[in-house]
């Protein structure tokens, strides 16, 4: 699935105001709406993974030691997100804000999560700041997610193995 066949490089870098307005409108209405709500929040992780390039990378720079800090390739991303079906009962992302950057192929997103853990009354509610970099055909080639690792650790304190069912990160 290509995001609306958009040529991101068509926006001149000196038109920051126009680029910012376009990104905010596009991402708020087209990307964040259907793809986040119909993909992530609906736990349709194949649809979410299809937004990524085959060689895409997700980085989690502040990941705790029992959570992977990097995923490489669309298949690894699909597997990572698919594992959330057994970890989370529901996910909702709100208070979404988007910012353009000086690179017309890159945007920043800030949002909050309202996440209920599966088989538990516990919640994992964090705040995220993310960088998305798109390739020439509109696929995500880099997704860098910053989050508070202490909130993640506390949410899974009683069941650390449930943390996406993944082994500790290796360097």
Image (spheres, helix red, strand yellow):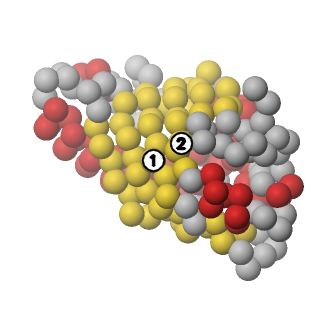
Residue plotted at (64% across, 66% down): 124
Name the disc covering residue 129, or none: 1
Which residue in the structure is indicated by mark 2?
145
Residue 98 placed where, x, y %? 33, 48
Q: Quadrant of residue 134?
A: top left
Real-space CA distance between mark 1 and mark 2, rounded to the nearest whole angstrom: 6 Å
Q: Is residue 70 left or right of residue 161?
A: left
Residue 112 placed where, x, y %? 47, 61
Does the CB distance between marks 1 and 2 fall below 8 Å? yes
Residue 133 placed where, x, y %? 44, 29
Q: Is residue 124 left or right of residue 110?
A: right
Name the disc covering residue 26, or none: none
Of the pair 2 and 157, the residue shown nearer to us: 157
Residue plotted at (70% across, 46% down): 64
> Callout 2: 10 Å neighbours few (<14), some, many (20+)?
many
In the rendered image, is residue 88 in sight? Answer: no
Number of numbered discs visible in the structure rendering: 2
Residue plotted at (41% across, 51% down): 110
Residue plotted at (40% across, 46% down): 109
């Amino acid at each position: 699935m290509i995001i609306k066949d958009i040529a991101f490089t068509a926006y001149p870098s000196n038109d920051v105001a126009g680029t910012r307005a376009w990104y905010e409108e596009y991402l708020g209405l087209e990307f964040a709406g259907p793809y986040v709500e119909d993909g992530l929040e609906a736990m349709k992780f194949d649809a979410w993974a299809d937004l990524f390039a085959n060689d895409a990378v997700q980085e989690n720079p502040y990941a705790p030691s029992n959570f992977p800090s990097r995923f490489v390739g669309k298949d690894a991303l699909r597997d990572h997100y698919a594992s959330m079906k057994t970890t989370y009962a529901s996910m909702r992302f709100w208070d979404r804000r988007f910012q353009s950057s000086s690179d017309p192929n890159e945007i920043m997103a800030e949002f909050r999560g309202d996440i209920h853990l599966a088989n538990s009354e516990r919640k994992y509610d964090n705040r995220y700041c993310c960088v998305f970099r798109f390739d020439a055909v509109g696929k995500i080639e880099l997704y860098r997610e910053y989050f508070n690792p202490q909130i993640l650790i506390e949410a899974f304190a009683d069941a650390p193995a449930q943390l996406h069912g993944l082994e500790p990160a290796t360097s």
